[in-house]
Amino acid sequence: MSSSVPRLVIAAPSSGSGKTTVATGLMAAFASRGLAVSPHKVGPDYIDPGYHALATGRVGRNLDAYLCGAELVAPLFAHGARGCDLAVVEGVMGLFDGAAGEGELASTAHVAKLLRAPVVLVVDASSQSRSVAALVHGFASWDPEVRIGGVILNKVGSERHEGMLREALDASGVPVLGVLRRVEQVGTPSRHLGLVPVAERRAEAVGAVAAMAAQVRAGCDLDALFALARGAGALAGDTWDAGDALAFSPPPPLPVPVPGGSAPRPPDRAERARPQTPDGLKVAVAGGAAFTFSYAEHAELLAAAGAEVVVFDPLRDEELPEGTRGLVIGGGFPEVYAPQLSANEPLREAVASLARSGAPVAAECAGLLYLSRELDGLPMCGVIDAKARMDERLTLGYRDAVAVSDSVLAEAGSRMRGHEFHRTVVEPGAGVAPAWGVRVPVRRVEGFVQQGVHASYLHTHWASAPGVARRFVERCVGSWATAG
């Protein structure tokens, strides 16, 4: 199947140039014209997609060539953009900045090439005039496979300043598709890990997105931008589908034959595509303001594996959803809400009780903190015998990981790529049975595996290893059977 959805990649020479304002504003402006806009973000960022979703009314999706592999970028894009009139992809960092030490891998330029999409370069013009032409020329000529289709000049001071910039760019061959004036910062406050997520300030975020859209409508040529998007080349290949991904993923290990019995027959693809799970098997997924970091594909894979996915809010709900046989707690900001999470004693006990029963529990980063004995001195669930606290140092980066212990997510020896992003420390950093071994920044083991619990700082993208979701749901079935 091929995808011919019109698309744009919004990039910049560096972080802080205004990519998020322009990309989110464009999404909202085109959506207000009645277009179905598919929002995407390059890299592992969880926060910007929340603003994208608010702008478009559709799930914000990540495109990460490091976590998922370059071969999955176009299929995952086509999955998210299916049936849409336009797709807008917000880049990460500077256009050519990728995974450290990996060349162009996972850079905005890399993803733009994989999507055969034109790039719109957002340039902070606040402290330059004629030099802007040299900068744009350099970016446009650096990699012939990256097509810079236009420039949006941001933080332009006056009409005279705009005239100087346009005159300088006339000879560059790169058209100016928008000019945004210097204005007070649109109301998108930040803190220690970036923008404050939409879930924590929805009313204010609605206003911020509306302001971005108004700014973009006033300063950008939307018709020219849409025409540029329509010039993107068709994408060949399959569209990602959770059910197909499970069907084509490696089957689980065969059971050991019973002495004297016949050898077990490996399941064929059709059998793997139709998971045999009991009706009503529920996997609870933490949500709400404290747990906002998740990839949409995780829930889709769990559902394709036969689970009923139910979202709950640890800040408000005092019980897990009735019938919960598995629990997924992703990333977020539990450190911001530690008093409220600690005060919800009934839910903390329910989580601890589920973990003691042996039911599968998968926790990433914020989930690890929530399962710990305490966070910044406040009691948490006590599932993991460790203490968590805020730290001044930012831990950030991609990781190549190897599963150290058999768990509900992976067999020992399995390899997976992940990402760390936190300003907290858990002591000790690993249990008797660690979750992962990583090489960067130093060789170490981290995380905890005990009974059905897998808790770690590492964020992973299950689309890269769909068998993780199937293994988790199968363990839920086994736990249910044992409990019954």
Image (spheres, grey):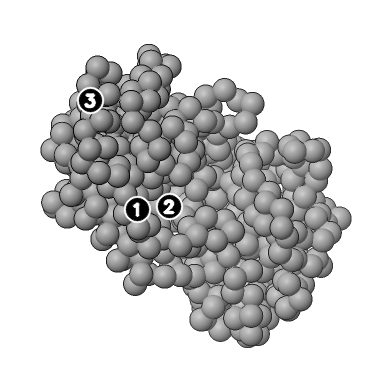
Q: Position of residue 437 (x, y in %)?
A: 77, 42
Front residue of 465/5: it is 5
Please state the horizontal and vertical placement of residue 373, each as a whole percent of the image. Answer: 77, 72
Q: Amino acid at mark 2?
A: Asp
The residue indicated by pointer 2 is: 48
Marks 1/2: CA distance? 6 Å
**Residue plotted at (27% across, 59% down):** 211
Closer to viewer: mark 3 or mark 1: 3
Please tell me which residue is depicted at 46% across the width and 70% down the height of the picture. Answer: 200
- Residue 47 seen in the figure: yes
Q: Is residue 115 visible?
A: no
| Image mark count | 3
Q: Residues within 10 Å of mark 1 (few under 14, many from 20)?
A: many
The residue closer to the viewer here, 269 or 459, is 459
Disc sitting over residue 285 in the figure: none
Q: Quadrant of residue 230?
A: top left
Q: Amino acid at mark 3?
A: Glu
Which residue was labeled with disc 1? 52
Q: Look at the numbered disc 2 and give the secondary structure of its residue.
A: helix
Nearest the eye: 407 or 101 = 101
Cα distance in 3D space between marks 3 and 1: 33 Å
Residue kind at label 1, given as amino acid type: His
Asked if the residue at tag 2 contacts the one at tag 1, i.e. Cβ–Cβ closer than 8 Å, the answer is yes
- 3 or 2: tag closer to the N-terminus: 2
Label 3 residue SS:
helix
- Mark 3 or 2: in front is 3
Circle 3 sits on which residue? 167
Q: Position of residue 194 (x, y in %)?
A: 52, 55
